[in-house]
């Protein structure tokens, strides 16, 4: 396993925005899913969403406030969070899978090959 390198995040007021980024491992396969998970204090790690060259998956509860994008040339995945809420507080982990045909159905903890180090996000009301 390889630890992915995350950056960004931090603290924000409710209603604000934050952006996280993460560099994937090599080789830079377009077919691997790259994306994000969140772990609230005392809770299990849950998916936010991921994408590869042919599919994008969003876990439904956050879909309207979250945008996941990927620079395939640079092997970087981004998480843009808008209209932040206090319940968005937690540790955010980027992740990647092996090459898969579709991220939908493959974006869960058990299918992750590599994880980032985690970034704390705190949203205050």
Image: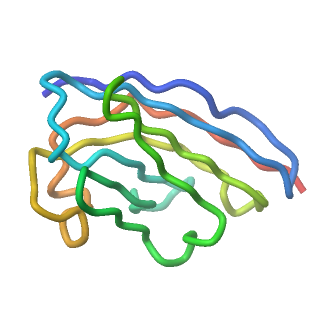
x, y percent for residue 71? 40, 34
Quadrant of residue 100 within the rendered picture: bottom left
Is residue 3 toward the left or the right of residue 1 in the image? right
Is residue 7 toward the left or the right of residue 115 in the image? right
Tally of numbered discs: 0
| 45 vs 64: above or below | above
Q: Nearer the viewer, residue 76 or 6?
A: 76
* Residue sitting at x 64%, y 38%: 19
x, y percent for residue 98? 10, 44
x, y percent for residue 38? 48, 53
| 2 vs 59: above or below | above
* Residue sitting at x 15%, y 35%: 29
Q: Nearer the viewer, residue 109 or 36?
A: 36
x, y percent for residue 45? 39, 57
Quadrant where the image shows the N terminus: top left
Quadrant where the image shows the C terminus: bottom right
Q: Nearer the viewer, residue 48 or 101?
A: 101
| 104 vs 84: above or below | below
Is residue 65 toward the left or the right of residue 79 in the image? right
* Residue sitting at x 73%, y 55%: 82
Colour mode of the rendering: rainbow
* Residue sitting at x 54%, y 24%: 7
Quadrant of residue 95 within the rendered picture: top left
Is residue 110 toward the left or the right of residue 23 in the image? left
């Amino acid at each position: 396993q390889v630890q992915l390198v995350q950056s960004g995040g931090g603290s924000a007021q409710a209603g604000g925005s934050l952006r996280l980024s993460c560099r994937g491992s090599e080789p830079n396969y377009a077919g691997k899913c790259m994306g994000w998970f969140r772990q609230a204090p005392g809770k299990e790690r849950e998916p936010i969403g991921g994408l590869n060259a042919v599919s994008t998956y969003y876990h439904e509860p956050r879909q309207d406030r979250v945008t996941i994008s990927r620079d395939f040339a640079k092997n970087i995945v981004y998480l843009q969070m808008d209209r932040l809420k206090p319940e968005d507080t937690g540790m955010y982990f980027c992740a990647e899978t092996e090459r898969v045909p579709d991220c939908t159905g493959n974006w869960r903890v058990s299918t992750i090959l590599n994880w980032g180090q985690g970034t704390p996000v705190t949203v205050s009301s």
